[in-house]
Amino acid sequence: VESISRPFLYLFNKKSDTLCCFFRYYFISLLRVQIVPRNLRNCLNRAFALPESGLSSFRRVKGGAMTDRFIAYIERERRYSPLTVRNYRHDIECFAAWWCDYYGRQEFAPAEVTAEDVRERVMQRVECLAPASVNRELSSLKSFFRYLRSRGEVSSDIFKRVSQLKKPHRLPT
């Protein structure tokens, strides 16, 4: 197990590398479902420099009733495809988990989210994802907060001051 941890330590300490972020996500998802044997899980926890509790900082936060109502709305009333619905749910839950970890909260409170929080999240996601993927996450969050605002759950439009990332232009072939 120790011989495995050295390459992991090297690979996972390079946080800006896209491939590294993919492997981090992949192994974190393996650890989450606990497919990995205990000794390898401990090695990966050390390689990721995770806290003693393991994946506590990568926990999944359910968005609660507001998220469920929003998902039902886009599924039934807006008739979004199942894949889009799944991606929206994932994006909202990941943002909620990040926000709770960032502020040390147990529960996600959308009314307390600021534009600076969204920008901070975007800056972290840019290290691992392409601009198009980050823009998709922003679109999911923007739709969610627009829905909450129409229902009176959130008072201001925080996405008014958050812009999409510019995508690189491809050269013609």
Image (tube, helix red, strand yellow):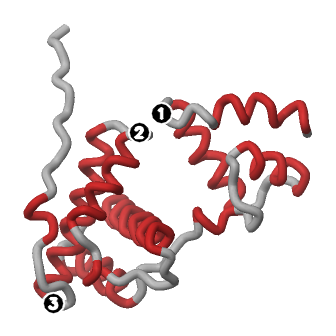
Tell me residue 148's x, y (percent).
20, 83
**Kind of residue indicated by mark 2:** Glu
Q: Which residue does the image show at 41% across and 81% down from the upper left?
A: 108
Real-space Cα separation, disc 2 to disc 3, in angstroms:
34 Å
**Badge 2 local density, few (<14 within 10 Å), some, or many (20+)?**
some
Tell me residue 33's x, y (percent).
70, 62
| Element type where label 2 sits in the image | loop
**Badge 3 local density, few (<14 within 10 Å), some, or many (20+)?**
few
Residue lying at the far top of the rendered structure = 173
Real-space Cα separation, disc 3 to disc 1, in angstroms:
39 Å
Figure quadrant of the C terminus: top left
Q: In this view of the protein, which residue sits in the foreground, 71 or 81? A: 71
Q: Earlier in the sequence, mark 2 or mark 3?
A: 2
* 3 or 1: mark nearer the eye: 1
43 above or below 2?
below
**Kind of residue indicated by mark 3:** Arg
Tell me residue 35's x, y (percent).
78, 57
**Kind of residue indicated by mark 1:** Ser
Q: Name the residue under label 2.
A: 127
- Residue 151's label in the rendered image is 3
Q: Which residue does the image show at 39% across and 65% down from the upper left?
A: 95
